[in-house]
Image (tube, rainbow, N blue to C red):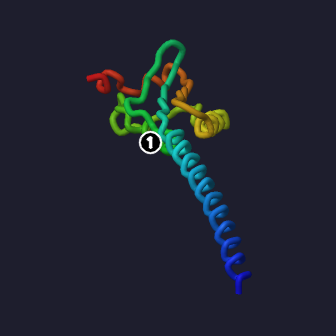
Amino acid sequence: MEWLGYFADVIGIFGAVFALFGWRQARQVRQELESEKNRQNKKVTVVLQCGADRLELPIELRRVELTRAEVLGRIGMLPMKVKGQRFSLDYVSTIEFARQISQIIEGEGDALLTIPCEKQELDQFDVTRRRA
């Protein structure tokens, strides 16, 4: 019956080792999740740019919110010079725009999404109302 005591001691030691290993793994996973949460909460600024003229969207996006649809929705919230007209930007239909969004999503830190546009594309927005 003495062997039963040794067997219980060995099981106890193995249990303590596995519990320590599990605690370390849980702590590591928690740190990784916290780091990813912080990365996803970094700000992304969207700017429409035509040469030296820049129109920055008034509300920054968080990286977790950055999708093509969300960017287009935020641009659509800008006041238009012609009421009821929908905006038109050629660049948002390109593969380069999708690549730029993917790079920002995968990146670190705060980011800047620059949408190059022509003068007439930038002029469709009523920037005087936005500044008021």
**Location of residue 13 with respect to 116 vertically, above or below:** below
Instruction: Give the residue displayed 62% in from the left and 33% down from the top.
Output: 100
Label 1 crowd (10 A; few <14 / some 14-19 / many >=20): few
**Location of residue 8 with respect to 71 vertically, above or below:** below
Q: Is residue 30 left or right of residue 127?
A: right
Quarter of the rendering containing residue 61: top left
> Secondary structure under badge 1?
helix
**Location of residue 36 with respect to 122 vertically, above or below:** below
* Residue on which the image places disc 1: 73
Picture mark count: 1
Residue 120 in the image, given as x and y percentages of width and height: 49, 22
Q: Residue furthest bottom?
A: 1
Q: Residue furthest front?
A: 2
Quarter of the rendering containing residue 16: bottom right
Q: Is residue 62 visible?
A: yes
- Which three-letter amino acid code belongs to the residue tagged 1? Gly
Residue 126 in the image, given as x and y percentages of width and height: 35, 26
Q: Is residue 68 visible?
A: no
Residue nearer the viewer, 40 or 70: 40
**Quadrant of the image containing the N terminus:** bottom right
Instruction: Give the residue displayed 64% in from the left and 35% down from the top.
Output: 103
Instruction: Give the residue displayed 56% in from the left and 24% down from the top.
Output: 116
Residue 69 in the image, given as x and y percentages of width and height: 51, 45
Q: Residue furthest left?
A: 132
Residue nearer the viewer, 17 or 52: 17
